[in-house]
Image (cartoon, grey):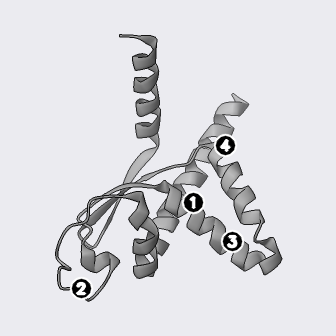
Amino acid sequence: MSDVADLADLKARADAARDFSVPIEGRNFTLRVPTGFELVLTQRSADQMAGLGAKAASMVLERLLTHAAIVGWAGVTVEDILPGQPDGEKHVPYDVRFVDLLLDARPKWAAKLAAELLERIIARTSALAADAKN
């Protein structure tokens, strides 16, 4: 195996170690906990909204994190993304271009995904802090 293949495998394993699943109403979402660096970049993006107030900045941060964290799904349909369509039962394969549409169409799902993600971010941050002390 070449060094490049080894690096690609290492990256894939590192990503998989941060992945987790969230089932919602018969659908399954794969989310990836952001790295510390990704958290910093996302926070800086959200900070640009500080002029709109703390609540708005918090909402932007939550949305940015949730959007970036969704790396896959199964069972999502046209109806989930665009209610009332005649082909609503058709499954939609994961595509990052549809993530915002889904989050907008299903705010309760967006809130659940954000809550699950926040819980994982806190756990990962705590574990990394504990490791740093050792």
C-alpha distance separating marks 1 and 4 = 12 Å
**Residue contact at pointers 4 and 3, CB within 8 angstroms:** no
Q: What residue type is labelled 2?
A: Gln
User: What residue is shown at x 17% (from left), y 76% (from top)?
Assistant: 89
Q: Mark 4 points at which residue?
A: 37
Work out whether residue 36 or residue 118 is closer to the camera in this orientation and state it: 36
C-alpha distance separating marks 2 and 1 = 29 Å
Q: Which amino acid does label 1 sit on?
A: Leu
Q: Name the residue under label 1.
A: 65
Q: Mark 2 points at which residue?
A: 85
Q: Which amino acid does label 3 sit on?
A: Ser
Q: Where is residue 109 in the image (x, y as percent from the top left)?
A: 41, 74
Work out whether residue 129 or residue 43 is closer to the camera in this orientation and state it: 43
C-alpha distance separating marks 1 and 3 = 11 Å
**Residue contact at pointers 2 and 3, CB within 8 angstroms:** no
C-alpha distance separating marks 4 and 2 = 40 Å
The crowding category of the residue bearing disc 4, from other C-alpha atoms within 10 Å (few below 14, some 14 to 19, many at least 20), is: few
User: What residue is shown at x 42% (from left), y 74% (from top)?
Assistant: 101
C-alpha distance separating marks 2 and 3 = 33 Å
The crowding category of the residue bearing disc 2, from other C-alpha atoms within 10 Å (few below 14, some 14 to 19, many at least 20), is: few
2 vs 1, front mark: 2
Task: Tell me the tag on residue 127.
Answer: none
Mark 2 residue element:
loop
Q: Earlier in the sequence, mark 1 or mark 3?
A: 3
The crowding category of the residue bearing disc 1, from other C-alpha atoms within 10 Å (few below 14, some 14 to 19, many at least 20), is: many
Q: Compared to 6, does 77 lie above or below? A: below
